[in-house]
Image (cartoon, grey):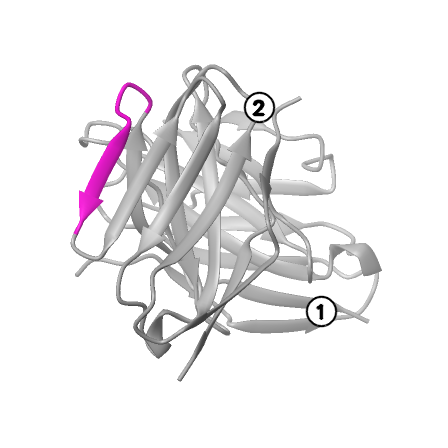
Amino acid sequence: GEDVEQSLFLSVREGDSSVINCTYTDSSSTYLYWYKQEPGAGLQLLTYIFSNMDMKQDQRLTVLLNKKDKHLSLRIADTQTGDSAIYFCAENGDSSYKLIFGSGTRLLVRP
Amino acid sequence: EPEVTQTPSHQVTQMGQEVILHCVPISNHLYFYWYRQILGQKVEFLVSFYNNEISEKSEIFDDQFSVERPDGSNFTLKIRSTKLEDSAMYFCASSDPTGSSRTEAFFGQGTRLTVV
């Protein structure tokens, strides 16, 4: 079945770039998403990419998509302590509106 | 900015009791969803709802679960007879399929359900 995998933990120093990786199995994925979850809060949509694109940039965020390898990454430039959170990768197939989430990557930004 | 609102933020209930979780989706959205996240696990899809009926549901969404849109603004999830394993954070979401991203779903803050 459909599956989305992420590494569990990433620690970076403030000011450095962070790269969070995700792999997925559903070749019919139409849209891929990155959500952010701060402690005790809900899921905040950060950005998304359509499957016929290979890159999308939105201020400090860059999403790269390698459709052949089914690999998605989120790069956060100039990472700040406020970026510390759990980041979820999610995808949906063309025939469904439901989202399949990864386990989340906990990003810790050290001062 | 419009947002999805969930109440209560935390619900404690005894095993076997019925519980209803409440959500107010974004007003012009047409698709509504429930997801859950058991502590330390993935966010899992439960059900989607469109045009006053369930459009898709997962294996988790068995006969103990039901959803309803009792009026023009609320969207509820009912668990008929709660079990310990129903303890989780429940997220409501809504989306507008006519937008630039067909399934750009906006999530509420969640209701933490604890079954004791």
For the C terminus of chain A, the image quarter is bottom left
The amino acid on which the numbered mark 2 sits, given as a three-letter code, is: Thr
User: Measuring 50% from the left and 73% from the top, which residue is drawn there?
Assistant: A40
The label nearer to you, 1 versus 2, is: 2
The image position of residue B52, as x and y in percent, is 41, 30
Element class at badge 2: loop
Against A1, residue A37 (above or below) is below
The image position of residue A75, as x and y in percent, is 34, 51
Which circle marks residue A25 in the picture? 2
The image position of residue A106, as x and y in percent, is 54, 63
In the image, residue A57 lies in the stretch drawn in magenta: yes
Q: Nearer the viewer, residue A105 or B30?
A: A105
User: Measuring 54% from the left and 20% from the top, which residue is drawn there?
Assistant: A26
User: Measuring 49% from the left and 22% from the top, which residue is drawn there?
Assistant: A69
Against A70, residue B82 (above or below) is below
Same subunit: marks 1 and 2: no
Range of the magenta residues? A51-58
The image position of residue A67, as x and y in percent, is 41, 21
Which circle marks residue B114 in the picture? 1
In the image, residue A2 lies in the stretch drawn in magenta: no
Q: Nearer the viewer, residue A34 or B48?
A: A34
Where on the picture, by quarter, is residue B17? Answer: bottom right
Crowding at dot 1, Cα within 10 Å, few <14 / some 14-19 / many 20+, comes out as some
Crowding at dot 2, Cα within 10 Å, few <14 / some 14-19 / many 20+, comes out as some
- In the figure, is residue B100 to the left or right of B55? left
User: Measuring 48% from the left and 35% from the top, which residue is drawn there?
Assistant: A99
Q: Nearer the viewer, residue B54 or B111?
A: B111
Give the Cα distance between marks 1 and 2.
33 Å
Q: Chain letter for mark 2, please.
A: A
Q: Are marks 1 and 2 in contact (CB under 8 Å)?
A: no
Q: Nearer the viewer, residue B18 or B114?
A: B114
For the N terminus of chain A, the image quarter is top right
